Image (tube, coloured by chain):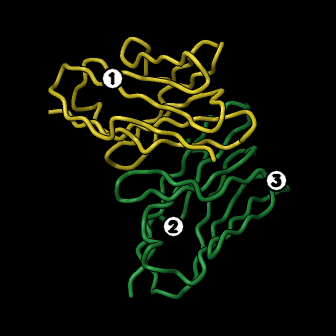
Amino acid sequence: GDQVEQSPSALSLHEGTDSALRCNFTTTMRSVQWFRQNSRGSLISLFYLASGTKENGRLKSAFDSKERRYSTLHIRDAQLEDSGTYFCAANTGANTGKLTFGHGTILRVHP
Amino acid sequence: GALVYQYPRRTICKSGTSMRMECQAVGFQATSVAWYRQSPQKTFELIALSTVNSAIKYEQNFTQEKFPISHPNLSFSSMTVLNAYLEDRGLYLCGAWGANTGQLYFGEGSKLTVL
């Protein structure tokens, strides 16, 4: 079965509001990356976490350091340009860069 | 910084023909390169993982005969989709990983359309 469960699958936000995406892992993960895919298909790396939290502007991500079974991406003060499809991807452990992707969250921010 | 260039961005080919795509890592040493396909439904499948000086490991349902990969050095990799058919449509992405970086850096993808 799927090792990465991402939720929600779709999200509609008013400009200026906050929300969070979540990925649950069915097994312990070594690290997690969050991406935004733009309309051209490019995967833009937002965060890479092996533990703890990271923040970049209005985005903040956390990776459960204890059991390593979930990660979150928080969006604060959502803007129109945040619209896109967000993916989490986790590394199961082998030190090779092989990632297992979630199914994505389609985010739409509207005025 | 670390960048990955992937080309071509898109290819339209006739059924039964082939498409080759290339991936160039800049600013870091790409110890491993992972080739993924994103289906029109947006799900990702790992095709194969190539590590320099090791055998290329293909995932189930993907073979070297169909998706030959070359990874001759720490900055370049290429993959060909041979005898492409409708089921091969999608966005092909190369992700390069460096031992010193920990994370995977992706190229912009090569979109394959098969007529």
Marks 3, 1: nearer the viewer: 1
Residue marked by disc 2: A8
Compared to A28, does A82 lie above or below? below
- Tell me the CA gap for discs 1 and 2: 33 Å
Chain letter of the residue carrying label 1: B
Vertical comparison of B95 with A55: above or below? above
* Residue A102, x across and y down, in percent: 54, 51
On the image, the x and y values in percent for residue B87 come to: 27, 32
Residue A38 location, quadrant: bottom left
Residue at image location 42% in from the left, 78% down from the top: A80
Kindly identify which numbered label has been placed on residue B81. Answer: 1
Q: Colour of chain B?
A: yellow
> What's the amino acid at mark 1?
Val
Kindly state the secondary structure of the residue where label 2 is placed: loop
Mark 1, other Cα within 10 Å: few <14 / some 14–19 / many ≥20: many
Name the residue carrying label 3. A67
Q: Residue at x 38, y 11 (%)?
A: B65
Q: How much space separates mark 3 and mark 2, taking CA atoms? A: 22 Å
Front in this rendered view, residue B42 or B27? B27
In which quarter of the view is residue A11 placed? bottom left
Q: Which subunit holds the residue at mark 3?
A: A
Q: Residues at marks 3 and 1, common chain?
A: no
Q: How many marks?
A: 3
Of circles 1 and 2, the one toward us is 1
Amino acid under disc 2: Pro
Q: Is residue B107 left or right of residue A2?
A: left
- The chain whose colour is green is A
